[in-house]
Image: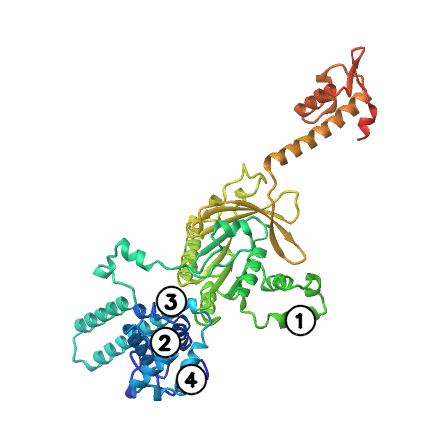
Amino acid sequence: MSPDSTNGATPSGPGIPSGGSRDERLPPHDVGAERAALGAVFIRERLEPLDRLLTEDDFFLPVHRPIFGAMLSVTSRRLAMDIVTIAAELKNQGELKRLEGGEAYLMDLAGSVPNSDNIEQYAQIISEAAARRHVIALCANTMSRAYGGASRAVELAEDLTGGLARTMERAGFPTPGSPAALTTVADYLARVRSPGQRFSTGLPSMDRASRGGPPPGKRIVVVGAPSSAKSTLAAQWSHDWELAGAAVVFLAADESPESIAVRIGQLIGYVREDLEAEDDDARRAAATILADRKILLLDGEDVSLEDAAAALDQLGCAGQPRVLVVDSLQTIRCVAASVHENRRDQIVAVMGLVKAIARSGAIVVAISEMARAGYRSGDRAQDTSVLASAKESGAVEYGADLLIGLRAVRDQVGQIDVEIAKNRLGHEKPELRLRLDFASARLAEIATPDPEATARTAGAAKLQKAKERVIRVIMGQELRTANAVATAAGGTRQHILAALSELRAEAKVVVVNGVLRVAQPEVADG
């Protein structure tokens, strides 16, 4: 039986005009979400939370309404919630014979659930569609009355606004000023739910800091200097999170979709040179593997952020977690931002849309360029903080649940320092180091060097070079004082004097007849 099957019933109810004025378009609905919600009840063996989130009229397909009604009846009598009891209840009500397949249809519902833990998300989809149908019905009724001329305009407006307010309250969106809008702490606590599935970042320290990784509805901003593997990390998360069950849309404007596709090809085991070779065998093989994967790459030069959000809504199935990657905030097209001339206002508009997309239940990973002050010196102590270096606007900082800063490690090819500058997902803000495996295009966490040990190693290396320089000048000239040695050797005076002092303490430089001499010439060869 098709998931979109109406089970022999004609859709009806609010939002579906009748008679000659019938609109040929189907009203808002999601049959997949309805089937998944009802099926999840059988798997979970309890009606909660549907009993407090939905009514029978919220279901688009008429055949689903008596099923939900039977579930309410069984729950009120504290009977077991399973296919047998619901089938018996439907039979008593004379509704079972109306189901195409009878009890088999109920079994089909139970087998159509992607993930029963997402039952509340299915309910939200159903409720939203029902509210939209009610809005359509209210507007259609108002239009009919307005054309008829029997009602005054003020009456029409009052009835319409009143009806819309009731629809908002019914859908769980209280109107401002109404008693339902004046919620207490207890009311808000009652709304608290598990955040849902968390998606591992693949980086142990970051997973610990975020309590297992970001859940749906969160915004991650990755701020990075040039060549700090921002897009590589985003591609890696896209690949891994899709494997974990998410539908992913990657809006690529900073780097081309082809470049991101090559990275994902590397992540599934192909060699970059083969993927970019004139011979397309590797590309064809990788494309075959990735054909059924729910990762949609969109070209940021042609597709706006609004288009990407719409594509995300259409990708995947009901209740499936969704991920949108925006690469980058500074380079994507955004209709909402195009009305502003000021760059700061444009970024504020983009972040406003990012926030709205996340509030719809998606994880949004937004890449942001780092201002030059954040990486110019190459010294973390002197560079501007990550919080201050997100380009153009504080909206980037304020709009993030998790703000991550990436900087390439000087003189260490493929190593990236990561700073968690803001963390609403947990309490820790660790610093970690990543190493890029260029063959697989995968970043992995490595041990962060001890700063004190690193400083000691660097200091010892400088001292050794200074000692070698001191020995060379003493062997080549007759020098009598430390100042003379420092002048002849050049370089940093402090290092030269320290090197001479240590050489004399080691008896490798001695004074003979008032002249500094090398006691062990072979040291100079080391």
Mark 1 lies on residue: 285
> In this figure, which residue is indicated by the disc labeled 4?
104
Residue type (three-letter) at the residue carrying disc 4? Ala
Q: What element carries label 4?
A: helix
How many angstroms separate mark 4 from mark 1 (CA)? Answer: 41 Å
- Reading the image, the residue beneath label 3 is 120
Camera-nearest label, 3 or 1: 3
Report how far apart the C-alphas of labels 2 and 4 lie in the structure.
Answer: 27 Å
Q: Residue furthest right?
A: 522
Residue type of the residue flagged with mark 2: Pro
How far apart, in angstroms, are the residues tagged by discs 3 and 1? Answer: 39 Å
Tell me the tag on residue 28: 2
User: How many marks on residues?
Assistant: 4
- Quarter containing the C terminus: top right
Q: Position of residue 259 (x, y in %)?
A: 61, 61
Q: Which mark is residue 449?
A: none
Mark 3 to mark 2: distance in Å? Answer: 19 Å
Q: What element carries label 1?
A: helix
* Residue 521 picture location, percent across and down: 83, 24
Closer-to-camera residue (505/475): 505
Q: Type of residue at label 3?
A: Glu
Q: Can residue 435 be seen in this view?
A: yes
**346 relative to 237 in the view: left or right:** left
Name the residue furthest top.
513
- For the residues marked 1 and 2, what is the alpha-carbon distance in whole angstroms? 40 Å
